[in-house]
Image (cartoon, helix red, strand yellow):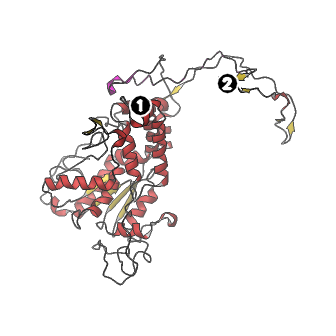
Amino acid sequence: MMGRGKAFDPARFFIICLNVLGSPYGTASPLTMNPETGRPYGPDFPPTTIRDDIRIHKLVLDRLNISSIAAVIGGSMGGMHVLEWPLCTPPGYVRHIVPLATSVSHSAWCIAWGEAQRQALCADPTFNDGWYDEQPRAGLAAARVCAMLTYRSRTSFGLKFGRRKQVQKLESAPKKVEKVEDVDALTPPPSPLVNASRELETPAHISSPDDSTSITPIDTSTIPRRTETSSSFSPTPTPALRRQEPSPPVPIFSAQSYLRYQGQKFLARFDANCFIHITHKMDTHDIARGRPAPPTSLCTCARPASPASSSCSSSSSECGCASYPSSSPDIDVDPELDADPDTRCALARLPPRALVIGISSDNLFVPAEQRLIAAHIPGASCVLLDSIDGHDGFLLEFEAMNRHILEFLRREEPGIYVGEVKEEIEGFEVRKTSVFGEAEVEGEIPG
């Protein structure tokens, strides 16, 4: 999407992409050295919010003598930044916004998935409450595997992998990965081996290590058994279970291999404390936090607005937030998911005529959340891209995303496109697998 004639055209825009606080690629994070201790901050690194990121990004733009932003565009956590930019900067500083696959606040569903990932990471005994000398490899890889599942959809996994099996080379222990190139895509960390010739018999007696308690198996021969021809139970004795043939080897499916590869690859790219920090940062996101709506008798910010209206007025006697649930009444919003007055007021203060884009199969930031955003921004439009790729669709539907954003920029900023010359637009094929594996070159990734 970046290049001459594309949405992100460096010949027409000064394009800035900044990282976030808490990221191992950012300005400061748990990896930053604490001058008082001489070691990384680790879990002592202070929590940060999406708004903190905006404030530090604004300092960068001030240093660059940038007086206004034509458009802020971003997806997922970047979409959270998009919604906060106009609310954390002077009115008019941000002229347009394009939030992609995001939400007005982090939902309970997303918070729960983040907690599942953190629990997987913290369960690694080497995590040591964040005071580790080496990365808690098993925990960080498991957390990444959990996250990867939320980024895609059931359909995309089914079409990509099906039930294909992967070639498995058994090793006595997982190979330590020092860098991504060391990952053997065909040899994921082996699961515990199953003794194929072992007979499945119940032992006569199972003792605890100190033999203070014991478990004696129940005699199942007298337990009633349901018959196929009647809903009643029959006391027919059940014969002992015993394998007549050796079990087949446990297969490694392509879907498993892919997730294991992504988990191992992540170890060379990220840090456990940074992972925890960023997931907590996303949990804090709520554009209405600390921004209560004025009394309804004084507020017009959430009423149906004309395209030119985007500010919250406290001088009008007209009622707004409570009586007017939508600033773009042509966009349907699920009543059960509609925003509260504080959120509606915050959305109504955003630049008008925003372009909101969602993914039809997104299970993290669902389409209803995109419609909610667009419904309460004056004159906004909502586009749902038909994709099976789940949340990652906003990173993979290059051509459709480029078309909608480019049309939006041409319409809203025609002066930037004055004197246009015919330009050759490069294709949208993936030439290099992205750092975190969202976009993949065919054949480079196992599965």
Please tell me whether residue 395 belongs to the stretch shown in magenta.
no
Residue 96 image offset from top left, x and y in percent: 26, 62
Residue 283 image offset from top left, x and y in percent: 41, 52
Q: Which mark is residue 174?
A: none
Three-letter amino acid code at the position of disc 1: Pro
Can you say which quadrant of the picture contains the C terminus? top left
Q: Is residue 164 above or below residue 87?
A: above
Kindly state the secondary structure of the residue where label 1 is placed: loop
Q: Is residue 369 above or below residue 205?
A: below
Name the residue: 35% across, 77% down.
Answer: 300
The CA distance from mark 1 to mark 2 is 30 Å
Kindly state the secondary structure of the residue where label 2 is placed: loop
Residue 438 makes an appearance in the image: no
Q: Is residue 416 above or below residue 312?
A: above
Query: Based on the displayed image, in which of its 4 quarters is residue 31 positioned?
Result: top left
Determine whether, in the image, residue 216 is placed left or right of residue 354: right
Three-letter amino acid code at the position of disc 2: Ser
Name the residue: 49% across, 23% down.
Answer: 190
